[in-house]
Image: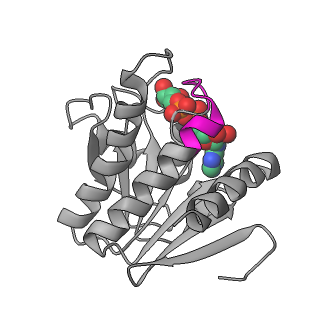
């Protein structure tokens, strides 16, 4: 991948953790993560973009899966996407309750566990829950970065985890959090 200004990479336990400004539907990692709803139905934001880019077969497969609870993750094929698989996870709707951070952490962790079980070597995440679900971006970003980093430290896989931020301001905020997290080791 071409290195551009809005890209950062760190090595964790021999694997790569990347931050990129871009579009989740364009990522060529083996799996991309969908910020799904409980019905796994096409929606707006990431879910809408993923379903449009993957084509109608994605919904045909998704609707057989019996939905998905908040914090859980389910796997489908990627169809017309560059990614072979989509891991669908439902982040929490932000309510400022103590459950929010636990559920958001579960969404990242269960997606990574599913990738591990399936032998998926590279995976791209969007900033789960920070759009329609209203999770404050800084709080969500801290959870995303810490959960991915811990998973890589403890499991040594996948080979590559990429957090894909949509837009410059979102990238800059996550860049700051990413650097702070790695500097405080
Ligand atoms: N690539 C990467 N990131 C994107 C893209 C894209 N193509 N489109 C939007 N984003 C960003 C948003 O800017 C936001 O920061 O992804 C983040 C998550 O936004 P949402 O897709 O709204 O996800 P979420 O907050 O988890 O809400 C999920 O929205 O579309 C519905 O059906 C979906 O009900 C579910 C809910």
Give the position of the N terminus as an image quadrant.
bottom right
Going 18% across and 63% down the picture, which residue do you hit?
117
In the displayed structure image, the side of residue 181 where residue 107 appears, left or right: left
Going 42% across and 58% down the picture, which residue do you hit?
148
Going 52% across and 47% down the picture, which residue do you hit?
50
Whether 38 is drawn above or below 110: the answer is above
The answer to whether residue 143 is visible is: yes
In the displayed structure image, the side of residue 86 where residue 155 appears, left or right: left
Q: Is residue 128 magenta?
A: no
Going 55% across and 45% down the picture, which residue do you hit?
142
Where is residue 144? Give x, y as percent. 49, 48
The answer to whether residue 79 is visible is: no
Where is residue 83? Give x, y as percent. 45, 66
**In this view of the protein, which residue sits in the foreground, 171 or 98?**
98
Q: Ligand 1, what quadrant?
A: top right
Where is residue 93? Give x, y as percent. 47, 21
Where, by quadrant of the figure, is residue 89 drawn? top left
* Residue that sits furthest to the front in the current view: 184
Where is residue 150? Give x, y as percent. 37, 60
Q: Is residue 138 magenta?
A: yes
**In this view of the protein, which residue sits in the foreground, 101 or 92?**
101
**In this view of the protein, which residue sits in the foreground, 128 or 176?**
176
Where, by quadrant of the figure, is residue 19 drawn? bottom right
- Magenta residues, as a range? 131-141
Q: What colour scheme was applied to this rendering of the protein?
A: one colour
């Amino acid at each position: 991948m071409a290195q551009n200004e809005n890209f950062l990479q760190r090595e964790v336990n021999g694997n790569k953790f990347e931050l990129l400004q871009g579009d989740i539907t364009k990522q060529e990692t083996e799996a991309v993560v969908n910020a799904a709803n409980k019905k796994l139905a096409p929606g707006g934001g990431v879910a809408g973009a993923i379903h449009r880019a993957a084509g109608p077969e994605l919904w045909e497969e998704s609707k057989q899966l019996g939905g998905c609870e908040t914090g859980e993750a389910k796997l489908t094929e990627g169809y017309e996407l560059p990614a072979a698989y989509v891991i669908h996870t439902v982040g929490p709707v932000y309510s400022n309750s103590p459950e929010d951070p636990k559920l958001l952490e579960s969404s990242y962790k269960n997606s990574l566990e599913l990738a591990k079980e399936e032998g998926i070597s590279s995976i791209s995440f969007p900033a789960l829950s920070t759009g329609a679900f209203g999770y404050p971006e800084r709080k969500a970003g801290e959870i995303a970065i810490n959960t991915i980093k811990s998973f890589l430290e403890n499991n040594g896989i996948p080979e590559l985890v990429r957090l894909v931020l949509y837009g410059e301001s979102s990238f800059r905020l996550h860049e700051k959090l990413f650097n702070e997290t790695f500097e405080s080791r």
